[in-house]
């Protein structure tokens, strides 16, 4: 587990970095998925502050590639 003033993370850790599968929760968002050396990489799921969701590919912490974005109206 990694806890900072901004977020809490449960999951794989390598050299004190988020790595492997994990869940990160902060006051605005939730992310569950793959990490590579502290960056969201691979498949993941995010709930954004407006309750919109994204499930799909991530590269360098951002949705990128194939995925499904559902907007909350």
Image (tube, rainbow, N blue to C red):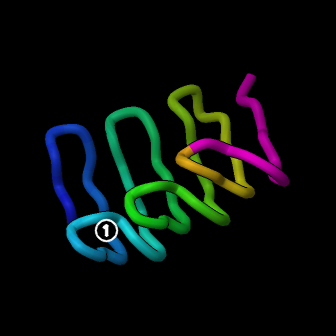
Residue 68 shown in magenta: yes
Q: In which quarter of the image is the C terminus?
A: top right
* Residue shown at 33% from the left, 35% from the top: 27
Was residue 22 drawn as part of the magenta stretch in this picture? no
**Predominant secondary structure, magenta span:** strand
Closer to us: 14 or 11:
14
Relative to 57, is 35 above or below?
below
**Foreground pick, 66 / 59:** 59
Q: In this view, does 14 lie above or below 34?
A: below
Which residues are drawn in magenta? 62-73
- Tell me what residue is drawn at x 29 percent, y 76 percent: 14
Q: Write the residue at 56% across / 49% down.
A: 60
Query: Is residue 7 or residue 71 the one in the foreground?
Result: 7
Task: Tell me if 46 is positioned left or right of 70 in this view.
Answer: left
Dot 1 surroundings within 10 Å: few (below 14), some, or many (20 or more)? some
Residue 65 appears at what percent x and percent y?
A: 81, 50
Count all numbered tags in the image, as a single digit: 1
Residue shown at 23% from the left, 38% from the top: 6
**Left or right: residue 22 compared with residue 53:** left
Q: Where is residue 68 in the image (x, y as percent from the top left)?
A: 82, 48
Q: Is residue 47 left or right of residue 38?
A: right
- Percent of width and height locating residue 10: 31, 68
Quadrant (top left, top right, bottom left, bottom right) of the N terminus: bottom left
Secondary-structure class at tag 1 = strand
- Residue denoted by label 1: 10
Q: Quadrant of residue 26?
A: top left
């Amino acid at each position: 587990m990694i806890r900072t003033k901004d977020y809490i993370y449960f999951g794989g850790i390598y050299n004190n970095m988020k790595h492997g599968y994990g869940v990160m929760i902060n006051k605005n968002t939730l992310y569950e998925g793959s990490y590579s050396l502290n960056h969201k990489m691979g498949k993941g799921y995010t709930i954004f502050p407006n309750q919109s969701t994204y499930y799909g590919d991530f590269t360098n912490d951002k949705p990128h590639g194939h995925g499904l974005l559902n907007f909350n109206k």
